[in-house]
């Protein structure tokens, strides 16, 4: 298999992040419509996270926040968002880069996005690093071959009209 020179994995991650960013921007500008609300799980040790030391001690690897009724000052940027939440009656502003997000859920409509990042800072910190990673499908050819055997290929030739 040829190496992916287009970078489909990165394009998919960017598109997925765009959905999350757009949803957060809509809520930031208009508030939540209906019963919508978000559960956002993110890696707390990811670089560029802004979180208190106390929260980091309580959640050293990952944390889930709920944006529903009591959140304030939601700010959405191209690469991150910031929000003020209350923890033990203390208002704290946290900043979360989109690449630190593990899952984004809107239970009101049974919508869930899972980003296939790991908690490896080097794995998700920059686009260049993602693009420079080796193609994972070439590393385990045996798994790829097993998956390909179960695939069915349908030719579209029988649906084409003959042009003469």
Image (spheres, grey):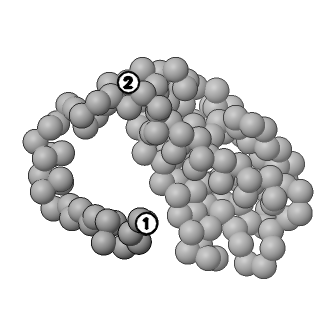
Disc 2 and disc 1: Cα gap in Å? 45 Å
Seen at 50% across and 36% down, the residue is: 10
Is residue 55 at least partly visible in the picture? Answer: no
Seen at 73% across and 78% down, the residue is: 35
Q: Is residue 51 above or below residue 150?
A: above
Seen at 51% across and 45% down, the residue is: 12
Question: Considering only order in the chain, which callout, 1 or 2, is on the residue closer to the N terminus?
Answer: 2
Q: Secondary structure at mark 1?
A: loop
Percent of width and height locating residue 105: 57, 63
Q: Residue furthest front?
A: 164
Q: Nearer the viewer, residue 93 or 30?
A: 30
Percent of width and height locating residue 75: 83, 44
Seen at 57% across and 56% down, the residue is: 104
Q: Nearer the viewer, residue 97 or 161?
A: 161
Percent of width and height locating residue 38: 66, 63
Left or right: 5 as drawn, with respect to 108: left
Say which quarter of the image contains residue 44: top right
- Quarter of the image with the C terminus in it: bottom left
Q: Nearer the viewer, residue 19 or 160?
A: 160
Q: Secondary structure at mark 2?
A: loop
Q: Which residue is mark 1?
A: 163
Dot 2 and dot 1 residues touching (CB under 8 Å): no
Percent of width and height locating residue 36: 71, 72
Q: Which residue is mark 2?
A: 133
The disc placed on residue 113 is none
């Amino acid at each position: 298999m040829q190496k992916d020179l287009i970078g489909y994995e990165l394009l998919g991650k960017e598109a997925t992040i765009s959905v999350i960013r757009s949803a957060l921007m809509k809520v930031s500008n208009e508030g939540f419509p209906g019963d919508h609300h978000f559960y956002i799980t993110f890696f707390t040790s990811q670089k560029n996270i802004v979180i208190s030391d106390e929260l980091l001690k309580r959640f050293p690897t990952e944390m889930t926040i709920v944006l529903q009724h009591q959140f304030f000052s939601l700010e959405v940027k191209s690469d991150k968002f910031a929000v003020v939440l209350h923890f033990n009656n203390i208002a704290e502003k946290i900043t979360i880069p989109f690449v630190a997000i593990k899952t984004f859920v809107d239970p009101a409509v049974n919508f869930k996005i899972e980003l296939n990042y790991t908690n490896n800072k080097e794995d998700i910190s920059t686009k260049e690093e993602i693009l420079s990673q080796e193609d994972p499908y070439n590393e385990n050819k045996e798994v790829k071959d097993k998956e390909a055997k179960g695939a069915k290929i349908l030719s579209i030739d029988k649906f084409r009209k003959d042009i003469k």
